[in-house]
Amino acid sequence: MPDRQSALCARRLIVATCLALVMAPASAEIFTREQAVRHALEHNPELLAMREQAAAAGSRRDAAQGAQLPQVGLNLSASSSNNALDAFAGRLNTRSVTAQDFDPARLNNPGYRELYLGQIGLRWSLYTGGRVSARAEGAAEMAKAAGLEFERARELTAFHALQSYLNVQLAEQGLIVAEEAVSSARQHADTTARLAREGRIVSSDKLTAEVHLASMQTGRAQARTRLERARHQLARVMGLVAPAEASVAPYPGSNVVVPPEPADVATLEQRALAQRRDLAAAQAVQVAARTQVDAARAAHLPHIDVIATHNRYDNGDANDSSNSVMGVLALDLYSGGQASAGVSAAAAEAKQAEWQVRARTQTVRQEVRDAYQALREARERHGIATGNVERARETVRQVQARYGQGRTILIDLLQAERALVEARNEELNARLGLEVGEAALALAQGTIALAGDARP
């Protein structure tokens, strides 16, 4: 019996390989699981968009931190004016005033005078009531949150790529089951048709076999549709242009390694709360929201700036330079309630972020519980389904023997074969649930392995 089972498994693997080769275009690359995950991590468009979002948040952090440093600027200007004050100021700035310049006629009618100005200025905010530093801290936390959300998105992409890959593999196996079922049903239909023509059976047996064949053909059509949908989903997750490019290796037999019983759910929950990156991202957003309250409150406090400039003047006749340094203290005494409203809005947003952290915490706990229960169910379901396939095979064998001896009717054989098809499909679904369930529990804990990880 073991030799027979080994031969049967080998035959199915050969059939699956041939089917995959026939259905895949000759130029299509056949991906392994690890390659499919790696390709998704490198080409999934939604993930790449989140990567750019995280990069933008990092740039905003750098900009906010740069606001704490002195700002240096350069201004160049050229003017031509017959304004009396501008003309005289040009003479003063170039230190070229003479006695003739005080002649009233010349003062009142200076004519058009050119002035060229080059200025280098430095402005440094010494005190802003904490506004600049609070914004810098908030931007740093938002950049941290964006990075964590991107890492979580990578985990989700890896999971969906693995799930989609397994869906394609097992959909191909399901199509093999459906093809075999149609082949067997057609043999029965052909046999009963011949026997009916010979008058050896009643016509109802022939009709029953034809109905059974139609049912199996319908199942095959559904299996093909499932396979095409699975290919489309895998292509989308992997960032492939065409579903035909999503070719997978044949499923490696039915020997699935059943994962060990997971730890108690409370332990898994604590692990998830410590390691889930999306929860850490929500906590970072909460910290950032608190800093914005401090930034809003700074509107009630004075601001002190230091400004220094070096100016170079040229009026066409002479040139000179000057330097200036000054300190500026500014305080908004009344802004129509804008400052107070800003503080209230920032406080409400900080409270919103706090509630979002609580909601995310509850979501993490629930996802762990759901994945834990799903994996336990998958383990039990797989054990039942595996044994049930063997029982269904033995039932078919025995009914075939009785039918060949004329000890039972055709409908019993067809029902036994239908039960075998259902058992094989259930075993495939249980196998998928077991493998996906294990990955889902790791995803819920934030510990899923990113196979073939290639970070940008």
Image (cartoon, rainbow, N blue to C red):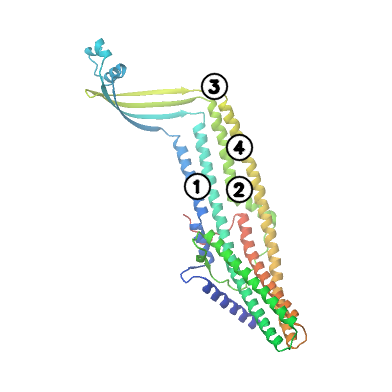
Q: Do the numbered discs 1 and 4 sit on residues whose CB atoms are within 8 Å?
A: no
Q: Please state which of the two labelled residues, at mark 4 or mark 3, is closer to the viewer.
A: 3
At label 2, the amino acid type is: Leu
Q: Quadrant of residue 112?
A: top left
Q: In the image, 25: left or right of 428? A: left
Task: Give whichever of discs 2 and 4 has the lower sequence position.
Answer: 2
Q: In the image, 453: left or right of 203? A: left
Whole-percent x, y for residue 31 in the image? 51, 67
> Disc 3 designates what residue?
334
| The one of 420 and 284 positioned closer to us in this rendering | 420
Secondary structure, mark 2, is helix
| The one of 42 and 285 positioned closer to us in this rendering | 42
Going 31% across and 17% down the picture, which residue do you hit?
85
Dot 2 surroundings within 10 Å: few (below 14), some, or many (20 or more)?
many
Q: Quadrant of residue 321?
A: top left
Whole-percent x, y for residue 293 in the image? 57, 33
Task: Give whichever of discs 4 and 3 has the lower sequence position.
Answer: 3
Task: Give whichever of discs 3 and 1 has the lower sequence position.
Answer: 1
Query: How far apart, in angstroms, are the residues tagged by discs 1 and 4?
Result: 22 Å
Query: How far apart, in angstroms, are the residues tagged by discs 3 and 2?
Result: 41 Å
> Disc 1 designates what residue?
53
425 relative to 111, above or below: below
Task: Give whichever of discs 2 and 1 has the lower sequence position.
Answer: 1
Q: Please state which of the two labelled residues, at mark 2 or mark 1, is closer to the viewer.
A: 1
Whole-percent x, y for residue 319 in the image? 24, 24
> Disc 2 designates what residue?
279
Query: How far apart, in angstroms, are the residues tagged by discs 4 and 3?
Result: 25 Å
Task: Give whichever of discs 3 and 2 has the lower sequence position.
Answer: 2
Q: Quadrant of the N terminus?
A: bottom right
Query: How far apart, in angstroms, are the residues tagged by discs 2 and 4?
Result: 16 Å
One can see residue 390 in this view: no
